[in-house]
Image: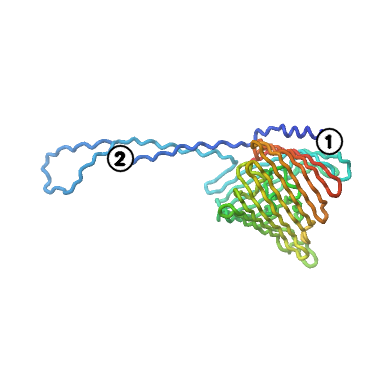
């Protein structure tokens, strides 16, 4: 990328960095606890000392009452201290409606405005740079509970809204699509929950992370290369429909996910009707050596809310007589003491089931958060294989400015793409996120 083009997109970057996310949600202090009310003393039998009874002039009874106890003086009067009023509940930080029967609904939004300057990796001159200002993600989020034991989650998205592409530079959208739509039964506790619907099959950690909670600017480029190979008529964002068991064993040491999913359906031919094949299976085991996460969408960083050290392994499989699709991954994360680092290895082979060449992917990301505000982050990615995809290495880094944590932040990243065959290229991206949920 030439200096002339760098100067071309520099003003847009400065505009994003200067943007003040002052309207982002900031945590409100919890209401102070009122002192515990002292127990009210027992009511005395009389408020005044007993007076002697007047002497009766009638004759004494013929038969006296034996063993009559002597009268004890009454206790002195005690004025009851009124109980302290109960502490007012802390104001909610969520936009949520809750009914007495345990049914609720909660709303949220995610907006990621992004500037991108992308170098050309074809045979065009190296200073030929495309530039876009677009919405990387526009999401509406809804979740809640039904009768305490059931949860639901829905989010919509239109990725890369108004990003120009193609020979005619047509801007993408506007439009909207459902990305996740699933329910969770949690009536048996956190050790065994059931998810059902449109969701992420468990594979690598990066693919299970929520977009608002990434440490860097975006997902790795190899995380979702398999997203469009399972026969969806539109962008599935790596999702599939299915049923999944999920839980955290007592003590939080081990988390598991295992499910059955729709996968690639067979195309009709002379011997088979359409969709007559078996389903897709995926599973994941994660060992938590520090805090457990206890969330469906994992985080790239908890920004100090938790201390994490985890190691995990995953698989993804669908049978085919001519060669089954299978993928495996191992990953590890450290997110403690202002250090956030993750590494992953993913192997994929589409076999005869899906159109996916054999490939190996290695990814790594590491950063340090200064004063809970600024994180310089280094990033590395390598994708290689014997088949169609070009072997490629991506290396670079950037800065994440946590002005309001995950609610509002600014991220600026530069990546250098090195292709084993073909031209190298550069990409520069700056993103401003506003998120509330």
Residue placed furthest toward the bottom: 271
- The one nearer the camera, 380 or 178, is 380
Q: Where is mark 1, residue-wise?
A: 5
**Residue located 39% across and 36% down the image:** 82
- The one nearer the camera, 393 or 175, is 393
Q: Is residue 247 above or below residue 119?
A: below
Q: Secondary structure at mark 2?
A: loop
Q: Nearer the viewer, mark 2 or mark 1?
A: 1
**Residue located 72% across and 57% down the image:** 328
Circle nearer the N terminus (2, 1):
1
Question: Does residue 398 appear left or right of residue 146 in this picture?
Answer: right
Q: Quadrant of residue 193?
A: bottom right
Residue 299 lies, in percent from the top left, at 65, 46
Label 2 Cα neighbours within 10 Å, binned few <14 / some 14-19 / many ≥20: few
Label drawn at residue 44:
2
Residue 437 appears in view: no
């Amino acid at each position: 990328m030439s200096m002339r083009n760098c100067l071309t997109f520099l003003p847009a970057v400065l505009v994003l960095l200067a943007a003040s996310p002052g309207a982002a949600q900031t945590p409100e202090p919890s209401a102070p606890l009122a002192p515990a009310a002292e127990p009210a003393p027992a009511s005395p039998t009389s408020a005044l000392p007993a007076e002697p009874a007047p002497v009766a002039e009638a004759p004494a009874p013929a038969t006296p009452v034996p063993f009559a106890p002597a009268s004890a003086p009454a206790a002195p009067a005690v004025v009851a201290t009124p109980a302290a009023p109960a502490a007012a509940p802390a104001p909610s930080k969520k936009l949520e409606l809750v009914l007495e029967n345990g049914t609720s609904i909660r709303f949220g939004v995610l907006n990621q405005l992004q500037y991108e300057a992308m170098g050309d990796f074809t045979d065009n001159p190296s200073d030929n740079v495309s530039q876009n200002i677009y919405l990387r993600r526009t999401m509406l989020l809804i979740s809640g509970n039904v009768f305490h034991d059931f949860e639901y989650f829905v989010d919509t998205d239109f990725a890369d809204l108004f990003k120009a592409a193609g020979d005619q530079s047509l801007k993408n959208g506007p439009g909207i699509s459902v990305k996740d739509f699933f329910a969770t039964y949690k009536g048996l506790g956190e050790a065994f929950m059931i998810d059902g619907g449109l969701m992420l099959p468990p594979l690598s950690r990066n693919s299970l992370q929520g977009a608002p909670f990434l440490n860097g600017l975006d997902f790795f480029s190899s995380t979702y290369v398999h997203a469009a190979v399972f026969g969806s008529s539109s962008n599935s964002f790596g999702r599939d429909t299915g049923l999944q068991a999920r839980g955290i064993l007592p003590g939080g040491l081990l988390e598991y996910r295992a499910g059955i999913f729709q996968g690639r359906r067979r195309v009709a031919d002379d011997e088979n009707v359409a969709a007559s094949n078996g389903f897709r299976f995926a599973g994941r085991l994660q060992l938590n050596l520090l805090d457990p996460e206890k969330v469906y969408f994992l985080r790239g960083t908890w920004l100090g809310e938790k201390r994490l050290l985890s190691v995990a392994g995953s698989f993804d499989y669908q049978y085919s007589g001519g060669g089954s699709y299978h993928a495996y991954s191992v990953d590890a994360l450290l997110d403690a003491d202002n250090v956030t680092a993750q590494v992953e290895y993913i192997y994929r082979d589409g076999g005869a089931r899906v159109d996916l060449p054999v490939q190996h992917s290695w990814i790594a990301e590491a950063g340090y958060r200064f004063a809970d505000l600024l994180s310089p982050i280094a990033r590395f990615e390598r994708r290689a294989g014997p088949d169609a995809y070009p072997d490629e290495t991506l290396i670079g880094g950037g800065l994440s400015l946590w002005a309001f944590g995950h609610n509002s932040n600014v991220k600026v990243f530069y990546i250098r793409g090195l292709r084993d065959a073909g031209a190298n290229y550069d990409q520069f991206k700056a993103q401003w996120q506003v998120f509330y949920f």
